[in-house]
Image (spheres, rainbow, N blue to C red):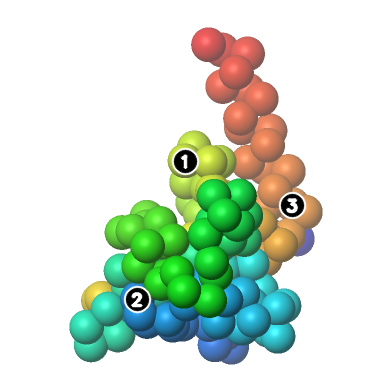
């Protein structure tokens, strides 16, 4: 299997879950469960990406004893998430995800949400290549 797949190819038929800053954590979790996804892209004015809400954020909110039905995504999301362009490769995305310690990466082109990738979207060859690179860098350092 190739390790040079473009992000555009990976997300070509995707319809990511998007909600607004004013939606609640409870609503986001319900949508995530229904769609069987681990993240929601949060949009602001004109549908522009302004944040990401993941299962980790949900756990944090519940751990703080906040009411998910009364807590807005604006208060719970990770604001201004890192993104990747659709013309980049799977390996580029995996490197960024590994370097920054996150599992979901929004795909944005010209300010428009195109999709989202997570570790499960990548092939074993792509994962193995990045893991091998990481091990090599660790030995060098």
Q: Is residue 97 visible?
A: yes
Q: Residue at x 67, y 42 (%)?
A: 129
Q: Residue at x 33, y 58 (%)?
A: 79
Q: Are marks 3 and 1 in contact (CB under 8 Å)?
A: no
Secondary structure type for disc 3: helix
Residue at the disc numbered 2: 21
Q: CA distance from mark 2 to mark 3?
A: 37 Å
At label 2, counting other C-alpha atoms closer than 10 Å, the crowd grade (few under 14, some 14-19, many 20 or more) is many
Relative placement, left or right, of 103 versus 1 is left
Q: CA distance from mark 2 to mark 1?
A: 24 Å
Instruction: Report the mark closest to the observer, 2 or 1.
Output: 2
Near-viewer residue (90 or 2): 90
| Residue that lies at the very extreme toward the left in this rendered image | 45
Relative placement, left or right, of 81 versus 53 is left
Q: Is residue 5 visible?
A: no
Query: In the rendering, at what x and y percent does residue 83 appear?
Result: 38, 60
Residue at the disc numbered 3: 125
Q: Residue at x 55, y 70 (%)?
A: 68
Decide which of tag 3 and tag 1 comes sooner along the chain.
Answer: 1
At label 3, counting other C-alpha atoms closer than 10 Å, the crowd grade (few under 14, some 14-19, many 20 or more) is some
Secondary structure type for disc 1: helix
Query: In the rendering, at what x and y percent does residue 109 appear?
Result: 32, 75
Near-viewer residue (55 or 129): 55
Query: In the rendering, at what x and y percent does residue 91 appear?
Result: 56, 51
Which of the 4 image quadrants contains residue 23? Answer: bottom left
Q: Quadrant of the N terminus?
A: bottom right
Secondary structure type for disc 2: loop
Q: Are marks 2 and 1 in contact (CB under 8 Å)?
A: no
- Tag shown at residue 100: 1
Relative placement, left or right, of 80 versus 63 is left
């Amino acid at each position: 299997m190739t390790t040079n797949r473009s992000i555009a190819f990976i997300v070509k038929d995707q319809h990511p879950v998007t909600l607004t800053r004013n939606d609640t954590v409870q609503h986001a979790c319900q949508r995530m469960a229904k769609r069987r996804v681990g993240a929601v892209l949060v949009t602001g004015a004109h549908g522009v990406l302004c944040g990401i809400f993941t299962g980790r954020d949900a756990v944090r909110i519940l751990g703080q004893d906040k009411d998910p039905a009364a807590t807005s995504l604006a208060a719970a999301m990770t604001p201004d998430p890192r993104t990747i362009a659709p013309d980049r490769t799977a390996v580029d995305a995996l490197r960024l995800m590994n370097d920054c310690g996150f599992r979901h990466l929004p795909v944005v082109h010209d300010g428009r949400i195109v999709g989202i990738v997570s570790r499960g979207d990548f092939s074993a060859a792509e994962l193995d290549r990045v893991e091998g690179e990481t091990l090599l860098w660790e030995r060098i350092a």
